[in-house]
Image: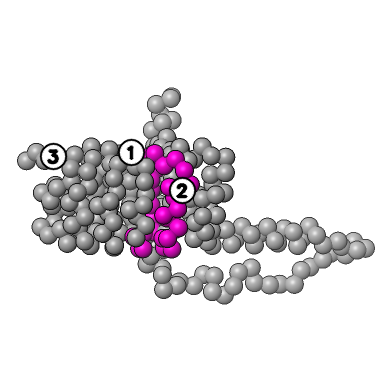
Amino acid sequence: MDLDTETISVPLLKTLSGEFDLDSIRFINLSGLNVKKLDSLSDCSCLEKVDLSKNSVTDLKPLTQLKQLWYINISANSVTCLDPLAELENLRVLNVAGNLIGSFDSLQCLTKLQSLENLRLQDPVREYINPICHNAFYRRTVLAMLPNLKTLDGERVTGRGSDVFRLLHDLEKDFTGNNVPNGDCFVPTSQRWVSSEFWSVSDSSKKDSDQAEEHLKELLQECNDLNSAASRHL
């Protein structure tokens, strides 16, 4: 059965998800279907993850009511406004690379999303970018606007990785800053490098695990894309 994919319809959602009830859909992949209008997607009240990449979407308003969404991939579309996402308080991962976001004002709505940790506005591997990314102060400004981000454009900016980097930097300063008189060897006092809680698993481990899995998938896909690009030039 041929289905029109330009407008997301109930039959299309049921066919692609394999679910009989829209309320049962937790994840839907609508990538590369030439989708223009999201319409019936708003009826998937329990939707948590959606991939809308490589379409022709311009309006995100139908996503406003999907309060359970924590993962959205809307890369490679024609989106200019992110305001409809402002009420998605569970949103943690947002990929809008390859759209038409042209100003920092367009990102202001994201400041309401305290759970947002992973944001992608550009993807050099796939050559996806937004006009805003050409600004000389792009990265600095985005991180100032969204201090809760852990990953921006695939690069980790906060969290345990950054803590370790700062720790090693401080250790290097300690060693290089110690003057050893009379040729004696300076032996620093043994101390913990990290706190005893550093390696402990927190109550939010499930959430972190889900996000880490998505990040790993993105990295693996980027590696595959790079390998394909290299093969074409051989």
**Which label was assigned to residue 4?**
3
Pair 2/1: label in front: 2
Counting from the top left corner in percent of width and height, residue 91 is at 36, 59
The residue sitting at 47% across, 43% down in the picture is 103
What's the distance in space between the residues labelled 2 and 1, CA to CA? 17 Å
The residue sitting at 17% across, 51% down in the picture is 40
The local crowd at label 2, few if under 14, some if 14 to 19, many if 20 or more residues have their Cα within 10 Å, is few
Front-most of 125 and 196?
Answer: 125
**Which label was assigned to residue 113?**
none
Pair 3/1: label in front: 1
In the displayed structure image, the side of residue 159 where residue 49 appears, left or right: left
Q: Secondary structure at mark 2?
A: helix
**Residue of label 2:** 105
Front-most of 95 and 78?
Answer: 78
Q: Amino acid at mark 2?
A: Asp
The magenta region covers: 88-115
Q: Is residue 122 visible?
A: no
